Every structure is written in C-alpha cells, then in structure tokens.
Image: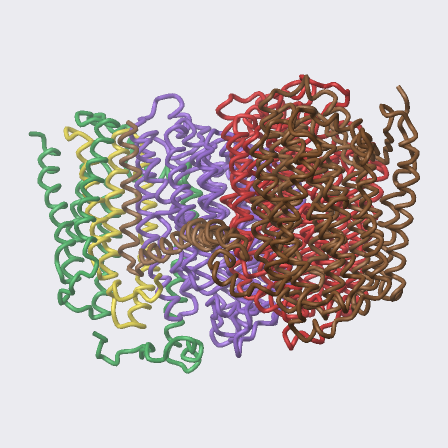
Amino acid sequence: MSQHLLTFAILFPLVGAVLIAVVGRTVSERDARILALITALATFGVSLLVLRDFQTGVIGYQMVDRAWWVRSLGLQYLVGVDGISLWLVLLTTFLFPISILASWKIETNVARYMVAMLVLESAVLGSFVALDLLLFFLFFEAILVPMYLIIGGWGSGNRVYAAIKFFLFTMAGSAFLLVAILFLYARSGQAGPPSFELGRLTQVATALPVQTARWLFLAFFVAFAVKVPLFPLHTWLPDAHTEAPTAGSVLLAGVLLKVGTYGLLRFNLSMFPQASSYFATFVSVLAVIGIVYGAVCALIQTDVKRLVAYSSVSHLGFVVLGIFAFTQQAVTGGVLQMVNHGLATGALFLLVGMVYERTHTRELAEMGGLASVMPWLLGAFLFVVFASVGLPGLNSFVGEFLVIVGTFAVSHTFGSLSAIAVVLAAIYLLWSYQRVAYGPLREEHRHLPDLSGREVAVLAPVLALLLVFGIYPKLLTRSIDPSTCAAIAQVRSSQTCADVGSAAVPAAAEGQP
Amino acid sequence: MVSHTNSALWVIPALPLATAVINLFVGRRLGRWAGWLASASVIVSFAVSVALVSELVAKPAEDRLFLQHLFDWISVGRLVVGMDLRLDSLSATMILVITGIGALIHVYAVGYMDGDPRFGRFFSYMNLFVFFMLMLVLGANYLVLYLGWEGVGLCSYLLIGFWSDVPANAEAAKKAFITTRIGDTLMLIGLALIVSRFGTLDFQTVFGTAGTVLTKDAATAIALLLFAGAIGKSAQVPLHVWLPDAMAGPTPVSALIHAATMVTAGVYLVVRSHVLFELSGVALTVVLVVGVVTAVFAATCAIAQQDIKRVLAYSTIGQLGFMFMAAGMRAYSVAMFFLVAHAFYKALLFLGAGSVIHGMHDEQDLRQMGGLRRLMPITFVAFAVGALAQAGIPPLVGFFAKDAVLEVAQHTGREVVYVLGAFAAFLSAFYLGRMLYLTFFGEARSDPARNAREAPPVMWVPLAILAVGAATAEWLNLTPEGRLTGFLESVTGATPAGHGLAVAELAAVATIISIVALGLTWWIYGSGRVDWIGFRERLEPLPRAALNGWYVDRGYDTVVIQPAKAGAWITAYVVDARIIDGAVNAIGGGVKRLAEGGRLLQTGFVRSYALAVFLGAVAILVYVGARQ
Amino acid sequence: MRTPVAYYLMLSGILFMLGTVGVLTRKNALLIFMSVELQLNAVNLALVAFSRLHDDLTGQVLAFFSMVVAAAEVVVGLAIIVAIYRRRRSVDVDDVRELRW
Amino acid sequence: MIPTPVIEFRPILPELLLCGFAIVGMLYEAFARRPDPVPHLAIASIGILAAAVAAFMLWDWTGAPYVLGDTVAVDRFSVVSRCVLLGAALIGCLYYTHYAARDPRSFLGEFYPLTLFATAGMTLITAANDLVVIFLALELLSLSLYVLTGITGRRSASEAAMKYFLLGAFSSAFFLYGVAMAYGAATSTKIVGVAAPGIVQALAGQTGSQALALLAMALLVVGFAFKVSAAPFHMWTPDVYEGAPTPVVAFMGAATKVAAFFALIRVFDVGLQPLTWDWTPVIYALAVVSILVGSVLAIAQRDIKRLLAYSSIAQAGFILTGLTAANSTGIRAAMFYLVAYAVVTLGAFGIVMLVSARGEEQTSLDAYAGLARRSPGLAALMTVFLLSLAGIPPTAGFIAKVTVFTAAIGAGNWPLAVIGVVASVVAAYFYLRVIVYMYMREPAEGMASDDGLLPRIAAGVLATGIVVLGVFPGILTGILEPASIVRW
Amino acid sequence: MPLDNVVFWVFAPISVASAIGMLLVRNAVHAALFLIVNFFCLAVFYLLLDAPFLFAVQIVVYAGAIMVLFLFVIMLLGVDSGVPVRERLIVQRPLAFALGAAFVVELFLAIRAGVGFTTKAPAVFTANEGGNTQAVAKVLFTQYFFPFEVTSVLLLVAAIAAMVLAHRKARAVTQAEIDAAAGEPAADEMPAYGSGTAAP
C-alpha cells in the first residue's frame, strides 16, 4: 500500500481529468467544478498519507514504486520521495484544491479548464517524484501543455503571446536537458543495459571526464534556469503571470517554478557535483543579479501581477543562491524558501485575483482606498505582503534568513548583496499595497463586497500555513535536513555536510571560513 | 551550575498577544471594552513583570538570570535557534518600562481613541506592539530579538498608517518601515556574520566566547552592522528622517512607540551587545559620534518646528542621541537610566501634547495655540513637568539623567563631547521652553485654542501618574552607588570612572544652562515683548531649513530616491523590456523573418525546384569526390 | 573492343548532364520531359557499357527495364501535360506557379 | 533452353493480392453502370485486409530469406512496413470515399485501384532486395501518385501533379543513374546476393569499385531524399501537398515516406553497409538541412497543408537523424518514428479534410479559428496530432523523438541532436499557432466543418493510437525489436 | 584505328551535338528531332557494345514509339514555335551550366578512379554466348522474371493513368466540373476545348 501511494497521487488527478473529460459535456458546470475539487482534495488526502508514512531522518528515497515501463528503452516507472520532494509534493497537492476553488468564477469551458488543471497536477506531481530521468523529462514536458492551455485559453489580454512565450521558453531550455539525458543514457549503455534511472545515471555522470560533465551540467542548468526563472532567462515569467488567470498564476508561482529549483537541486547537484562547485560562483552571480534585478524591476511596475512576477524572480533567486552555497543552512533554506514562496506568492496571486475579480483592473493606478470597503480582504493582503517581505514569525523569513546565513558563511559578498532584496521587497510590496489599499477610493469601487465564504475557505488554509511555517519551520526542516545534507556531502565530497551552526557552546574555530 | 529556568516568562508577552488576537477578530463587537481589555492585559503583564523582576532582584547579583526555552524555532543542521526568553537586569528594566508606561498609554488611548470606527483594531495593533516589544527585549538570542525588532516595525507601520485614508499617513507609515528596514537589513547581515563566526545567535554563547572567537576587525564589522539596525530603529542620523513623519500616527502611538519604547530598542541593542562593541572599540567611537551629532542636529531642527508633535519627534531623536552618547562612552547603565527617564518624560510630553491636540480638535500647529494653561490646567501642569524634566531642571529626573551623561563625558576627558552635549542640552531646553510658552502662555491665537477643553479623566489620570513618575523617577537611581545603574551592572559592567570637575560643579553648570535657555525663551516667546514671528522671519532662511530638517529629506530624494527610481525605470523598461526581452523577441523575430524570407525560395517555378535538386546532387557528389 | 569503356561512361555522363541542364533551362514542359528522356538514355548507355565491361548481361536487362519505365512514364507524363495544357492553354512551366510560398 | 525459375509466390502475396483487387476494382469501374464509392471501398478494403493477412503470415517465415531470384527479401522488417502501408492505404481509401461523397459528380472510381497499385509499389519497395525492383516499384508508386495527385482535375491539383511528375521523373533519373553506377561498381544490383555476390558482398570483399560505389551512393541518395522530401530535395512537397486532394495527401504523405525510408534503410544499412563511414555524413547533412528548413520555413505558412508539408520535411530530418547512427538502434528508432509519423499524418490530414467543409478546400489557418468552439472533437484530435508532431509527451511523437536522438547520440552525433531539439522548439511555435487558432480565437463567420462519422472514427482511432503509443511505446518497440534486424 | 573506335568518335560528337541542339533550339519539333538523332546515335553505341537486342529496341521503342508520341503531342497541342520569353529566373541558366560542369568533373574523377581511362572491356563478350537476344531472354526470364512482371503492372498503371486523365477531361466542360472548381477564381476557368485564342 505505502509504496503505491505516490502512484495513487499521480493517478488520482489523471483519473479525475479523464472522468471530467468524459462526462464533462453531460454534467453541469457546477458538477464539473465539484468533481475537480473532490479529485484534488482526494489527492491531497493521499499526499497526507505520504506524509504520515514518511520516515523522518531517513536518508534516501522512500515509498519507492518501481516498474518497467518500456523495457526496450530502459525506461522505468520509478518514483519515490525524500525530504526535499516530500514537501514539494505536499505543496502541490495543497495548492491545487485551493486553485480549483479559486477558479470557481471561471465560466467558459469549465470542464476543459478543470481537465487542464488536473492534468497539470498530475504532471507536476510526477516531476517531483520521478526518479528516472526520462520519466522526469516526460512529466516536465507534460506540464507545458495544460499550462499553455490555461494561460492561452482563460487568460487576459495578450494571453496568446504569453502562453506561447511560456511554452517556447521552457521547451527551449528543456531541449538541452533532453540531449544531456540521452547522452548519459548512451553512456550508461557502455556498461550493462542502458538505463534512465537516476542512480545509474548519477554513477555514469560522476565518472565522466571533467569537461564533459561541465557541458552536461550546463545543459541541465539551462533547462532548470529557464523554469526557475533565473536572470537573464526570466522574461517569460512577467508575461505569463500577467496574462494567466488567477489559478494559473498561483500554480505557476506556487508550483511550476519550483520544478526548476527542484531540478537544480535534485539533478544538477547530485549528478554533477564537481561541475556544480565549478560553476557555483557563476550560478550564484546570476542568482544574486536575479535577486536584485527582479526586485529593482518590481519597484517600478504599475501592473500588480507583473510586480508580483518580478518579485518571484527575486525570491527564486534566493532559492538558487541557497542551493549553490552548498551549506546545510543555505540549501535547507532554499528548499524551505521553495515551499514558502509557493505559499506566500500563491496567496498574493489569489488576493490579486480576488481584487481583480472585483475591480477588473490590474493597474495600481486604478485602485486605491480599497481597505476601507474590503477590510478583511485587504487585511489578508497585508498579512501576505508582510509574509513576502520576510517578516520574522511568518514563513518567508525563515527561508531567507537561512539562505543569507548559509550563503554568508561561504561568501560575504553574495550574502550581503542578496540582503538588498530584503529592503527592496519592503519598498515595492508596501508601495503597491499602499496603492491598492490606501488613498482615495474610486466611486465605482464604493460597493465592492468583502470576502465571500468561498474566498475565506480559499485563503484561510494558506494564511494559516504562512504563520505556522513561520513559527515552527521545524515541521519541515526536520525531514528536509537529512536529504539536503546528503546532497551537500556529495558536492563537497566529504562525509559530512558543511554546517555553519554549532550545537556545542564554545564552537570557536568551527565557523572560521 | 544553577538552573536559571523560569517557566513563567512566556506569560508576559503572551498576554498582550492573546488580547491582540481577540481584538483583531472580535474587536468590533467588543466596542469600548476592546480598549479596556487591551489595557488590562498590559496591566496584568506589568504585574507579572513586577513579580518576576522582584523575584530576580531577590537573587544574588551574579545569579540574576531567568531563562525559558519555549521551542526550537529554526533548527537546521547544527544551527539551532530556540524561541528562548531571557530575563536579566537589562531586560527587566526594559519590560517594566514597556509594560508600565505601556499600560498607562493604553488607558490614555481608551479616551483618546474614543469614537474611532476602528477602535478595536487600534488596540489590537497596540497590544501586538507590546507583544513584539516584549519579545525584543526578552529574547535570549539575536533572532528572537530580530523577531521583535521587525514585529515592532510592523506595528509601527500599522499604527502610523492607522488613519490610512489620508495618503500622507500611509506614506509616512511606509517611509518609516522602509527606512528602518535599511538598518534592519544591515543588522540581518550582522546576524549572518555572527552565525558564521559563532555558529549560534545565543547571547550567552556569543558574549561568553566573543573574546576568543572574534578578531578586532570582525568585532567591528558585527558591531557596526548591529549599530546600523540601531540607527534605523532609533532614528539616528542619517536614518532619522522617518521619525518626524511618523507623527502622523495617533498620539498614543507616538508616545508608546516613537518615544518611550520602540525607538529605544536601538539603545537596548547596543547595551545588550556592548561586549562586541567593546571588543571593537572603533564601533563605540562611531556610536558616540553618531549620538553627539544626532543630539545636536535634532535639537537644531526641533527649535524651528511648528507642529507640536514634530518638536517632540526631533526632541526624541536628540534624546536618543544622548543615550547613544552614553553608550558610546561605555556608560551603558547611564544610557539605560537615561532611557528610563526619557520614557517617563517623553511619554508624558507626548500624552500631554495628545491631550492638547485632543482638546484643540486635532490641531497640532503651535502657532494656532497659546494660553491653554487656563483651559487645560491639568494638562498644563503635567506637560510643564515633562518639559522641565527634559530641560534638565532639578530635581526632576531629566536633570539627573542628562547630568550623568555629561559627567561621564567630562570625567573621561571627552571635552568636546561634553561641550557639544551641553550645547545640545541648551538647545533642548530652548525648544522645550518655546513649545511650553507657545502652547500654554500668551494669548490664544485661534478659535480652537479659545475653545479648548480639558481632557477626560481617563486621559489625565495616566498623565498625572506619568508626571509624578517624571518628577520622581530619579529615586530609582539616587543612591550613592546608583540603584538602577548598579542593578544593571551585572549585565552592563561598571560605568567608567574618571576625574574631572566635581559632580556639584557639573550640576551647577547644567542647571545654569537650562535656566538660561528657559529664560531666553521666556523672553522671546512668553514675555510678549518680542515679536517672535518677525524675529523668525529675520533669521530666514535658517528657520525654514531647520524646519525642513536641514533638507536631509530633500537631499535623499535628489541623491537617492529619484536616481533610484530612474534606475529602476531604466532597468525595468529599458534593460528588461528592450534589451533582455528585446533579445528574446529578436530571436523570435529573426527566425520569423528568416522564415518569411526563406519562404520566398519556394518560388513556384518548377525549374528552380529542379535546380535545388541538382544543387543537392552536385553537393553530395562534391562531397563524394572529396572523400575519394 | 578498342575503345576504353570509360569513354562511353564519360559520354553517358555528358549526355546525362546535358539532359539535366535541359530540364533546368527549358521552359516548355514537353521539352523538359524530353530532357528527362535524354537523361534516361544516358543512363542506359552507361548500363550497357558496364554490361560490356563486366561481361555480364544484367546491364542490358536493366537498360531494357529502363526503357519500359520510360515508356510508361511518357504515357503518364504526356497525359498530365496535356491536362495542364487544356486547363491553361500553355505548356510553359513558368506559367504554372499558383502554388508557391 | 531456359531453366524454369523457382517461383515462391507467398512472399509477394500481399502485392499480388493488391494488384489483383486493383484489377477487380478496375473491372467494377468499367462494367458497373453507375460506379458507386461503397463497393469500390469494399473491394479495396478486402484487398488491403487480405494483403495484410498475407503479410502477417510472413512474420514467422522460415523459408529462404531471399526469393524470386534474390530480388525479394522476406523478413519481419518488410512485414512491419507492409502493415503500416496497408493501414495508410485503408485509411486513404476511407477518406476518399467520404471526400467523394461530398461531391458525387467529381468522384472517380479509379482512385481505389490506383491507390492499391501505389500501395503495391510501396510494399514492394520495402521488400525489394534488388535495386532494379526498387526502381520499378518506385516508378510504380510514383506513377500512381502522380495520377492521384491530379485526380480531381482541379486547377491546383493539376499544377501539383505536373510539378510532382516533372520533378519525380527528374529525380528518378538520378536514382536510375545511381543504380547503373552501383551495377558498375558491383556487377550486380542485388543488395544481398545469394546465388551470386550482391552489392554488399562485392563492396565488403573489395571486389567492387569503391569510387563507383560512392558515386552510386550519392546518386541513390538523391532519389531517396526526393521521395522522403529531405531538404534540399524537398521543394515539391509544399506545392504538392497544397494542391493535391486531401485524402491523397494523407495517404501519400504517410505512405511514401514510410516506403522510401524503409527502402533507404535496406539499401544503405545493408547494401552500402561497407560504406557506412562515407554515407553517414551525407545523411547527417541532409538531416541538418531538412530539420532547419522544415522547422523554420513552416513558421511563415498560412495554409495548414503547406504547414504540414514543411512539418513533414522536418520530420524527415528527424528520421534521418536516427539513421545517422547506422545501427539497429537507429533503424529501430527510425521505424518507430515512421510509424508514429504515418499515424499522425493520416490523422492530421483527416482532420484537415473534415475541417474544410463540403466540397471546398478550406485549408487556410483561418478556417481553424475557433474550431474548439465549433467542433471540439476535431480540435481535440488535431491537438493530439500536433502535439505528437511537436514531440510533446504523452504522445508517440515524444517517444519517437527520444528514440532517434538516443540513436544519434549513441553514435556520437550529439551536435545533430542539439540541432534537432533546438529546431523542435522552433517547430513547436507553429504547431502551437494552430492550437492558438483552434482554441484561442473566435470562429469566423460561415465556417462549417464536416460531420463525417467514418473519418472521425478513423481519426479518433489514430489519435488514440498516438496516445497509447506515447504511453505504452513498449507495444511497438516489442514488435520493432525483431523486425529491425535487417538480414545480411 | 580500329573500327569501333572510329565509329565511336564519329557518333559521340554527333550525339553530344544533337543533345546540345535539343537544348538550344526554340522549336519543340526541332528539339524532338534532335533527340531522335541522339537516340539513333545511342542505338549505334549499343551495337558497338555488343547489345544488338537493345539496338533494336532503342530504335523501335524509343526513337520510334516514344518520340513519335512526343511529336504527336507537340502537334496536338499546337505548340508555338517559341517566341523567346524573357528568362525570369536570372540565375537559373548560369547556375545550371556551372553545376553541370561540376557534375561532369565529379563524374570524370569517379570514373577515372573507378574504371580508369585505359581499361578496356574484355575482348570477347562471353555473356552473349548463343546470341544476344537469347542470352538476354535467359537472364530476363530467370533472374529477372519478377521485375519483368512488375513492369507489366507498371504499364497497366500507365494505361489507367492515361485513361483517368483523359476520361476526366472529357467531362471537363460539364457544369459539374465548374461547380467542383467553385472554390477557385472563376476568371481562371478556361474553356477546355479549342476556343483558339491562347492566353498570353
């Protein structure tokens, strides 16, 4: 039972999607929504079982489910979770019901929309748990289509451009990934039957000549850097976020971008440890540029979704920076930041969407004074803004702090520069909040309703988690820690992972870099 | 090793937190009871604090320490940061100030905020502030301190912008948060540096091992980064610009946050971390210089302010400068004494001002006041006590506090500091006198001033209590060995002693300075013999410059903000949209153009197609020929 | 056989080339098609020459097949050309370019 | 006295059946008073199915591997190709029946016999072990296709037929010259000789002339490249695809490529195997050019048939990518790709036919605006086909791309794979553009799509096949595994 | 100088010249006649190469049947004598000749390497033992009987093709045809049969 849980998690949405696709035309739109919601909730339930059965502190993959898929290609169905993917799986299954609930107002082609959502969920879950590279790639590419349809079909304004840009950008990046995977696969055929299994390919990759490994690292890196997105490959994100429907933005920010950072951590780091440390400075520079650059761009945006999109560029930079610092705190912080950013930015997009549903504008200049008519909505907004700003006690702070601390131990420059974003985040988020919430109220906004019961149901769980993960992040870190430690040990090629902390009281010399 | 665990510490911050949450969600339904509930929780918290502190005091000096570990907050690898509370003489002093003065201000606010539509929300924020402030001072490690540090910033933001329908208020709130955040971020880097050196943020470990772990340079770096946080939070030059604007908040907020407690967090931080500052040495000099500069600078600004609260704001900045001055001279306990004293009289002044504003129907301009002493006698007395206390008239508490600072300066041979401090004291006496006379003496200069009414008891009772406090708080320290300073020495170490003028001589000089200043202002503003408006005009442009804080704000705007905006604009709309995205679109466009061009190769002429075939064939043949 | 086989082969090559050039330069569909016939004949010459060279009759058989194919091709080709002509009153291939780009 | 040759007819039974039923069809057309599409379809279908059965029975052939004077090879390789080709023919006939039913006056019963003949040529070309047979089969299928292209007599169709014919004849001259050179080099036209040494034996044994063999290789490539429409021999493709009737394009696009590629594999991977190091660079270059030309030029197209034509050029490049490996992995990859490609092409053109309303050929992209609104089923099916062409999971196209790139990379040709994947991105753009039209545009006024049930079912089956192959490619790879070993 | 050499050197220039003539003359009939000359020359070469059977077939089938068919069609279509039309494809001609030259050079190199310009065929053509026609027949009907059968299908297809294309043309003037072509611009429609005036 336990070893099939992940498979169930992947299959549930798919089954639901097929069901809706089949009965979609005969049942009412409302039923299609409910069916989708039930499916997503069931998937969430399955993922909670995964959490229950997950053994904290165990290094390596758990709940591994394995079967041959295409034996002649050496393609396996091989899934499993470790402390890193566990939380991303949970984040995904958590955000999907919320997104579906947030999409209640979608009126056109509801069944098709829900099918796309559920297929997307399946694909994302698959990419987080796949331990066979081709399988991963399959899911990775499969993400594109439903998301493309969601942006292009239910987006706003310039949605087609944004959708195609999203698709092509990601696909362009993953093109190199595919070549690299196949290259490794071909190499693995030199000793025994070729395979795509992560473990096998890791052995192959670590045995490669240095130069080759570096090229392959870059091929992997480009694919994930686009997805993250890392400066200067980020320009698809503002467009995609701006034009996507609310749930699309939530999922894009909350889950899809994490596939990129997850990929960096899972594949780049573990498969090309030497190359990773060789390129660490390069990647860190990009990450730091992204952190500052995204924040600077966000400063001046007038479209609130665009602003949040740039803030994502900045926040995701933290994740990458953390991952490539190769210290326990930084990497764990990075993983934590993935989850936290997913929740916080997801919530931001939810709120922006709710505001948009009421005011029909994303232009900051056309809002204002909304706090006086919708105190609860804007109160929730403020809460989320401060979570994003990195207020201690709320979730994002923990990740950012750990990344900065962990990075600082390696490089004072990167650590310090990245902290600039902490200031800038406050500036752009508070500025935009001010434009939305305060100031004179427009006449046509005078009678806008406050949060509805459904919206409270959408927001409450997210906001609660923002607080819980801010106060007691140990919930997450205790299962993330062993996995990141293992990953770092590989890069540092030592038995222990680099740790800037010291449990012992007079740990004097330890911290000296 | 004696166990210092005390499992009751959490109660102190938990009470205000609980009521904050209650008021947040059901405050509207509680009506006026929301205020009383909030006040009650702070009062109870004060009571608990008193109980715990007396328990602490009862212990031998070297054992005065309570710790409580609530849970592991951030625990990654070997870096474990607990949600730990710590009560020692330093935090004891602070919590008493916070809960004590906080309680009074809460009660006062019940009256002041009466009738506000978001009454419950206000008290929720106030309680939340108290909670975070308590966390700040009770934290046993830098991260809990930082939690409180940022939390009070949040509350400050919420409360400054409480009346957010006025755009300026929201603007001020944002400015306050962002300006302090600059300092906070540097402080965060400081924390990172501490972690990288010590592997922990725990006060006990850091201070205990700093001497062996840190080099002088590292200590300087850490100390300066921490001090940057203090500069921001305590509104010291050059990050002082937010505080005058922060007066946009309701007056109880100004009293509690921007006078008595939050802004003093910087002083607390420096005193708390004095071990690091001392290791550095240089850092202390910086603290001293910043303190002196701020004290003088703020005083010059305060003289020219027209808004009663802005006078007090600049005054607060200057007084905080005095505290840093003391800290910079290693007289930490003196700084703390000053802090306590200042909390009394500045809260008093603010609440008095609030009472005046309340009585004047939200009029804050000094020029519109005058002659209020008859209409608002209680407020007048209280306010006068506060003003005189700060002006340094013995035997009020301000005299002793300021005298202690100047004494240290003089005794440790820092003559320049002494002179500048004395000058700042002179100026502060001057603007206090000006404010006092312009508000309460002379003729009423406007209708609100003529029709002003005394505050209700719920407001004047706290005022009165504070006035008594401001008048008698010196009792806390007026023992030969210094009761308060002595109590603090278990944390702060002894105040440096030295030789110089006798205490009496110094006191005399200080008193003379104050009296001269007050006399001068009485002559100008109170006697009616001088046309003070014309006098001001004759001095232009100096008063205007001082009024505008010597244009520091405008300077920032020109030098930092506008260029930054332009830079951001260029980044977002030129670099990002045109160059980076432009490159992306150029690739796409290039391929498209290539396709449109290549499409024309398909001419429709069957003979060109044949030519292509032949071309291909010959190309392959050429390859084959080369192969042979 | 005194003439070296290569001469025949070269002749075949030249004829093939001329046929090719004919396809490329003539505009009359019939002439283009005739040029193709020239190409096929050139190939036949090569086949027969190889047949002689290898002392093997396969080449001649191949040439024979090639002629059959040519005959069939001519039938179809001429039918198509006639069809085009009937529609357009022209056998100039340069005029037949509605399908392009 | 001529000795009676041993006639083993079973290996060519599929072709015999096809020709036989073609003749039956001709007789029906000739003698029926009013020829009707349905009996025609029945005759053709029976013929095709019978041929398929006959082909199946060759799967476990235990007789001589080369029969009929070593001109025909009997192997599983050709069984696979035959099945694919017969399927394509069946669906082509099905489409035409529907297509003609729209406008009974333009119906021509000869379509079916000609299709069967063309199919016979195609199946034969993949089984042929002799360059002469290949040439003859090539001509057989070409001549049939020329006529089919022009069968409606529409102005554009006749133009397409003429272009196709002139260029086809031109390129087949090159091919024939190649055959001659191969003969000159090896004294034989048999790919593998049993009775007497064939080309591969001659070349392997160094008895043949290397120089002439290379020349032959170059010229044969021209002929094959033309048929598979690899750039720069592709120029006929867009025009012919645009001009020819859609059912013909569906059949032709799918089947010709399959047949020509299977023959190419046999000639090059078996016959010219000793020259592997010489011909792989040629294939490599062709692959690069085809991929780039096909992917890039398709972007500018506004006609769905032209777009799919360019797409087919790019697809040819991808298949060639697999063949650069010159080993069984590459062959298997190419075979998989071909099957997937054939299915997709048949399906996509089926949709094209259905979208263009009765009697008209609305093939402009504008006809696809709002298709999802108008007929969601067609739009969904088209999406599946387009995604497969773009190589997005979970379609067969994805697995196909993976396998060809795997083969190429395994042979060290990773730069080619890089070019391929990058071009896939470019290609994705125009596939997505069609999806944009279908799903994200408002339908134009007065557009109506066809409600033909049979073609819809066919397209539905094909789409299901694409997805099933994408999810369980093992079904096909299991079959291809033994079939990809071309005997020598 | 041996006889075959003489004959070769006499007919080779003629064949090349006639081929070039076909390329250059404007009149299609002349071109066809040049091609016939060329085919005759080839027939002579077949004779020289000991292929009398093909010699006969070449004359009967090619020069006879096929070229007559060509001429017939030329006549039928009444092809103009070729008012020179400006070559619209400017690069076509020079490129064609350049590529043609390159083609021949490549061929020359290949033949030199593959056969050699001094290699002569064996003096005796043993394969022709018992008469060329009989020998060809023997090869054709044993080794190549299957391809031979294929050619029959090929011819059948050709016949069907001609029928289809011609048959349909017979209906081309009917209204149905015009309707079927309704998607095309009506102005492009042309009367199928001899309205005489050709479009310019």
Q: Residue at x 33, y 37 (%)?
A: D218
Q: Decide which of A74, A415 is in the foreground and name it.
A: A415
Q: Horizontal and vertical percent for residue B536?
A: 52, 61
Query: Eyeballing the image, is B103 above or below B493?
Result: below
Q: Quadrant of residue C55?
A: top left
Chain letter for the purple part? D
The residue at the far bottom in this view is E175
Q: Is residue A321 visible?
A: yes
Q: Is residue B274 above or below residue D58?
A: above
Task: Identify the colour of chain E in the image.
Answer: green
- Asked whether B389 or B215 is in front, the reply is B389
Which residue is depicted at the point 80% across and 36% down?
B477
Residue A46 screen position, x and y as percent = 82, 46
Quadrant assignment for the N terminus of chain D: top left
Q: Is residue A139 visible?
A: no
Nearer-the-camera pick, D180 or A416: A416
Q: Is residue B608 left or right of residue A199?
A: left
Shown colour of chain C: yellow
Chain A image colour: red
The picture places residue A385, in percent across and down from the top left corner, at: 68, 53
In which quadrant of the rendered view does residue A451 lie? bottom right
Q: Position of residue D343 (x, y in %)?
A: 57, 52
Chain letter tied to brown: B
- Does residue A23 sit above or below D336 in this rendering? below
